[in-house]
Amino acid sequence: MVLTPEEWVRLHVVQFLFKEKNYPKSLINVEKQLKLNNTVKRYDVVVYNKDGSIFLIVECKAPAVPINQLTFDQIARYNLALGAEYLMVTNGLEHYYCQMDFENERYIFLKEIPNYK
């Protein structure tokens, strides 16, 4: 099996969430389909809260893919359906973290995502 650059980033993100941020493996879900506006999309990583709501969505890109507004627009569209409190976008080299401000319909950039409580 050949590991694509995006899969390499995704594997490292899962290890980061598990080892560095202490999220339980049982709350981390990888590569599932999502129906969005009558189309089927796939998210990279989702971390759930204990109650089953979504805490964090992660969008992974290959290291050669720059992180730009289009990347944020993609994860924001996914989040319209998922309602996560936090978003993370990474290409393995650059990492961006946001907290949703649903009341004002915007995201607030953070230095890092919170550790598991």
Image (cartoon, rainbow, N blue to C red):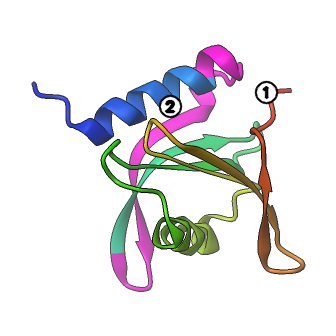
In the rendered image, residue 102, in percent from the top left (x then y), is placed at: 83, 73
Tell me which residue sits at (89%, 78%) in the image: 103
Q: Which of 66 and 38 is in front in this view?
A: 66
Cα gap from disc 2 to disc 1, whole angstroms: 15 Å
In the rendered image, residue 42, in percent from the top left (x then y), is placed at: 37, 58
Q: Residue 82: which quarter of the image?
A: bottom right
The number of numbered badges drawn on the structure is: 2
Which residue matches tag 2?
Answer: 13
- Quick one: quadrant of the C terminus? top right
Q: Which of 43 and 110 is in front in this view?
A: 110
Which residue matches tag 1?
Answer: 116
* Magenta span of residues: 18-39
> In the rendered view, does 82 fall on the left or right side of 110?
left
Whichever of labels 2 and 1 marks the residue nearer the N terminus, that label is 2
Tell me which residue sits at (41%, 35%) in the image: 10
Answer above or below: position of 60 versus 11.
Answer: below
Q: What element carries label 2?
A: helix
Looking at the picture, which amino acid does disc 2 mark?
A: Val
Q: Residue 109: which quarter of the image?
A: bottom right
Q: How crowded is mark 2: few (under 14 residues within 10 Å), some or many (20 or more)?
A: many
Assess whether residue 26 is covered by the magenta stretch.
yes
In the rendered image, residue 26, in percent from the top left (x then y), is placed at: 59, 26
Q: Which residue lies furthest to the top in this view?
A: 19
Q: What element carries label 1?
A: loop
> In the rendered view, does 115 fall on the left or right side of 12?
right
Tell me which residue sits at (66%, 42%) in the image: 48
- Quick one: quadrant of the N terminus? top left
Answer above or below: position of 80 versus 28.
Answer: below
Q: Residue 29 carries which label?
A: none
